[in-house]
Image (spheres, rainbow, N blue to C red):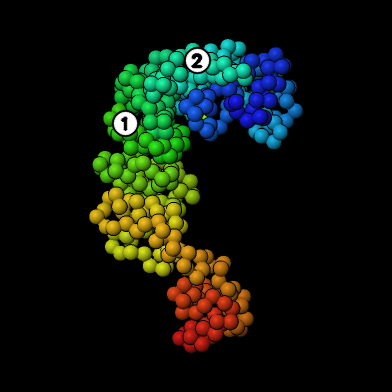
Amino acid sequence: MFGTRQSRTVITRLNEAGYEAVFVGGAVRDYLLGKEPTDIDIATSATPAQVKSVFSNTIDLGTEHGTVLVIESGEPIEVTTYRTEGTYSDNRRPDEVHFVTSLEEDLKRRDFTINALALRIGGEVVDPFRGREDLSKKTIRAVGNPSERFSEDALRMIRAVRFVSVLGFELESSTKASITALGSSIKTLSVERVKQEFDKLFNGLFAHEALELLEDTKLSEALPLYPTQQDSWLQCAPFQNSLDGWASLMIAGDFDASEVVKAYKLSNKERLFLQSVQKFYSIRLIRSYTIMDYYGAECSTLMSVEKLIATLTTRLPIDENTIRNAMDLLPIHTKQELAVKGEQLMEWTGRSGGRWLGEAIQAIEHAVLYQVTPNDHNSIKEWFLHEYECKE
Ligand code: ATP
Ligand code: MG
């Protein structure tokens, strides 16, 4: 049986109220492929107001676009009214949305045949564009005329490549030809939308094929920032996750972290990851890690660095177990794990706070990490008062 109990309840209750309601989009595609769907979308002939009247607990998710979040037994479920769309002149959201009552009209506005499938609660698949046939042929084919569909919304071209990466499918030939012809129009897209698709692309098992396709269709030339050394870049794929993808783009493209962050509007967390990879990659070009390096790094950062070292240099990489062991063996992993705090240092010395305090804590951290003193209150006090202070 498809979907969660709660999502089936939502469909059944809409049906009982006299509306058509079906599972749609990626979840149906993934179900037919025997994969676990990431999120479940429901489409309905009911208008947003009608959806809200059927359920007691709902949240508006932009009713002008037709989406209502229904909270059913604690589970949030997106319910979207059947609609058609105009063009995306700002390349973010469609200019106008018209609600319609026909499921087929709704499926027609969707990007690819494999995403234009619906599933009724009884198990019947609605497939007006032969999406199932394309699923079995492993083909990504635009719904309708590909050039028209890519002119309406250029993001669909990047989505096509993202599905190549995630599903390992191939582009149908006229879909591919249209991308090659219209690829430069992705320049007008909002970076946020492009970035989101790249996150998913980087997670795909077939990212190598997807990168080849970006090059092949020349989409790569229209992207905000892209490596010119195609060979190095291709060797980095597939990626461990999206962070690893962005880090690989940076190193293979010989970019500074700040350039990648700016070009793709990466988050703060992503910026910190890239800066850290950049730092440790340049360290590893000349030497191995020290205790201080292990202390200052996340395991996932060093895993990305080592993969890049193995791929792009002749240096021997350090394997995951070695990294994990080295990190496990550290006496402390953060400053918070130190057995003493700043206030205690002030108490011992009778001094008030100031720059000396930060320096002293750093010295204690160093002494504990290099096992000059064990990490317990008395030993640190002993070391601090007799070894550290007298050197001052
Ligand atoms: P995922 O498994 O990553 O969620 P998905 O196919 O569900 O993949 P979503 O971005 O969640 O992708 O979109 C849900 C559905 O909405 C798609 O399957 C497709 O039918 C439709 N869709 C999404 N974006 C577009 C678009 N830009 N143009 C046309 N249809 C789209
Ligand atoms: Mg989805």
Q: Nearer the viewer, residue 86 or 34?
A: 34
At x 60%, y 12%, the residue is: 101
Sequence order check, earlier mark of 2 and 1: 2
Residue 150 location, x and y as percent?
40, 21
Q: Which mark is drawn over residue 258?
A: none
Asked whether, in this view, residue 355 is left or right of residue 313, the answer is right
Image coordinates of residue 326 in percent, x first then y, are 43, 65
Across and down, in percent, residue 313 comes to 26, 53
Would residue 383 appear left or right of 176 to someone viewing this image?
right
Residue 8 vertical placement versus 297 (above, below): above
In the rendered image of this protein, does residue 358 appear above or below residue 105?
below
Which residue is drawn at the image coordinates 50% and 79% (left, top)?
A: 373
Q: At label 1, which amino acid type do we have?
A: Leu
Compare residues 146 and 353 and report the one nearer the observer.
146
Say whether residue 309 is visible: yes
> Which residue was labeled with disc 2?
127
The residue mark sitting in front, 2 or 1, is: 2
Residue tagged by mark 1? 213
Q: Residue at x 46, y 33 (%)?
A: 193
- Left or right of 252, for residue 106: right
Dot 2 lies on which element?
Answer: loop
Query: How far is the residue under mark 2 from the one under mark 1?
Result: 28 Å
| Quadrant of residue 189 within the rendered picture | top left
Quick check: can you spot residue 221?
no
